[in-house]
């Protein structure tokens, strides 16, 4: 899960761009000042929390979704709010 979180943060700077040019990447600067966390990271952390702390998956997801209700891009297209 740590890899999924890291990868999502690294790729966040390309999330809304149509990348048409392949450029070299500096492995020492994969996460930079333009990187941001996404709704995928929030959901992954919710599942990780449920696994580690032996919580109900659905209830934990609902809690995180409610806690980050105002996060943009929002979750509305994916979930009905509890």
Image: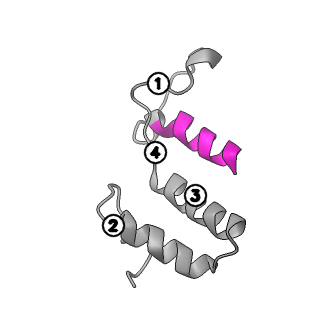
Q: Which mark is residue 69?
A: 2
Q: Position of residue 22 (x, y in %)?
A: 57, 21
Q: Which sits earlier in the primary sequence, circle 2 or circle 4? A: 4
Per the image, the residue denoted by label 3 is 45
- What whole-number distance in Å separates the C-alpha atoms at marks 1 and 2? 25 Å
Residue 46 in the image: above or below residue 23: below
Q: Which sits earlier in the primary sequence, circle 1 or circle 4? A: 1
Q: Residues within 10 Å of mark 1 (few under 14, many from 20)?
A: few
- What whole-number distance in Å separates the C-alpha atoms at marks 1 and 3? 21 Å
Q: Are marks 3 and 2 in contact (CB under 8 Å)?
A: no
Find numbered disc 4 in the image and state the secondary structure of the residue it sits on. loop
Q: Residues within 10 Å of mark 3 (few under 14, many from 20)?
A: some
Find numbered disc 1 in the image and state the secondary structure of the residue it sits on. loop
Residue 7 in the image: above or below residue 38: above
Find numbered disc 2 in the image and state the secondary structure of the residue it sits on. loop
Q: Which mark is residue 37?
A: 4
Q: Are marks 1 and 2 in contact (CB under 8 Å)?
A: no
Q: Which sits earlier in the primary sequence, circle 1 or circle 3? A: 1
Q: Are marks 3 and 4 in contact (CB under 8 Å)?
A: no
Nearest the viewer among 22 and 4 is 4
- For the record, the magenta segment spans 1-12
């Amino acid at each position: 899960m740590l890899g999924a979180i890291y990868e999502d943060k690294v790729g966040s700077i390309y999330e809304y761009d149509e990348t048409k040019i392949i450029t070299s990447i500096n492995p020492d600067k994969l996460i930079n000042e333009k990187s941001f966390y996404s709704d995928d990271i929030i959901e992954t952390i919710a599942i990780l929390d449920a696994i580690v702390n032996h919580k109900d998956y659905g209830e934990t997801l609902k809690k995180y979704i409610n806690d980050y209700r105002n996060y943009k891009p929002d979750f509305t297209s994916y979930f009905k709010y509890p």
